[in-house]
Image (tube, rainbow, N blue to C red):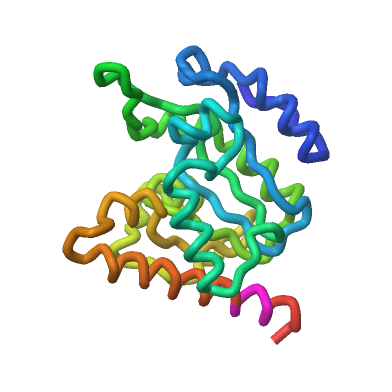
Amino acid sequence: MVHRKPASLDGLRKAAAGCRDCPLWAHATQTVFGEGAAHARLMLVGEQPGDSEDREGHPFVGPASRILDQALEEAGIDRRVVYVTNAVKHFKWEPRGKRRLHKTPAQREVEACHQWLEGEMATVKPALVVALGATAAKALLGPKFRITLSRGEVVRMEGQPPVMATYHPSYVLRLKGRPGGDEVYATLVKDLRVAARFIVQDKSGR
C-alpha cells in the first residue's frame, strides 16, 4: 500500500510511524524517521537504523555516528544544518545470544520504505543527497549501482536531487585498526568535502 504523502516532515513522520507495508515493523522497537534542518541543503541517507537508533528513536546516534560526526567536522560541515535519514526506517536484525545483529534489508523492504524517503526529499528539497553505503545508493540510483565503480561522483537522475555515494560510517568503524581502515576513513572525508563544495557552488549558481 502506498500512502498519500503529507506535505510536512511532521506529517510524514506521523504517517511513517504507523507503516505496516513490510514485515520489519513487527520486530523493531519503533519507526526511526529522519531528523535535522527542515530545509537542509545537504541530506545524508544511510541504510537503516542500528541497534542504538532503534532503541532511542533517532537516526545516527550509535557508534558509527561518532565516526560520521568526526568526518563531517573534518570536511567543514556542521551537522546541525544537515538532514539525516535512512533508506529503511525499521531495524532489521537477527538474534545472536543476547545481542541483536544487523541484517541487510531485502529489496522489497527497501522498496516498501522508499515512499518515505521520497517524501523527505520532496519536502526538504536538498541541493545534494549523499548516500552512505550500498543499500542507500541502490535505493536512490538503482540496483545496478556499484560504489566501487562510481563512489564520489555526483549523479543526476530525473525526479530527485543530485546524489553522490560514499562509504557508510559503519564500514569505516568495522575497519578501524585494520589494514585499509585509515584510507577508507580518509576517502569518506574527501567525499564529504566534495559534497560541501557542491552545495556552495550550487547556491552561488556557478
Residue at image coords 59%, 26% = 31
- Left or right of 32, for residue 166: left
The front one of 48 and 141 is 48
Q: Position of residue 161 (x, y in %)?
A: 63, 60
- Left or right of 95, for residue 158: right
Specify the farthest residue to the right. Answer: 7
- Left or right of 119, for residue 114: left
Specify the farthest residue to the top. Answer: 26
**In the displayed structure, would residue 109 be above or below residue 36?**
above
Residue at image coords 66%, 23% = 17
The N terminus sits in image quarter: top right
| Residue 47 on the magenta segment | no
- Left or right of 63, for residue 58: right
Q: Quadrant of residue 199?
A: bottom right
Q: Which secondary structure dominates the residues rendered in magenta?
A: helix
Q: Which residues are magenta?
A: 197-201
Q: Position of residue 4 (x, y in %)?
A: 74, 28
Q: Position of residue 171 (x, y in %)?
A: 33, 52
Q: Quadrant of residue 125?
A: bottom right
The number of callouts visible is 0
| Residue 200 on the magenta segment | yes
Specify the farthest residue to the left. Answer: 179
Specify the farthest residue to the bottom. Answer: 206
The C terminus sits in image quarter: bottom right
Residue at image coords 43%, 45% = 63
Residue at image coords 56%, 37% = 114
**In the displayed structure, would residue 22 be above or below residue 168?**
above
Q: Position of residue 77 (x, y in %)?
A: 61, 69
**In the displayed structure, would residue 57 be above or below residue 8?**
above
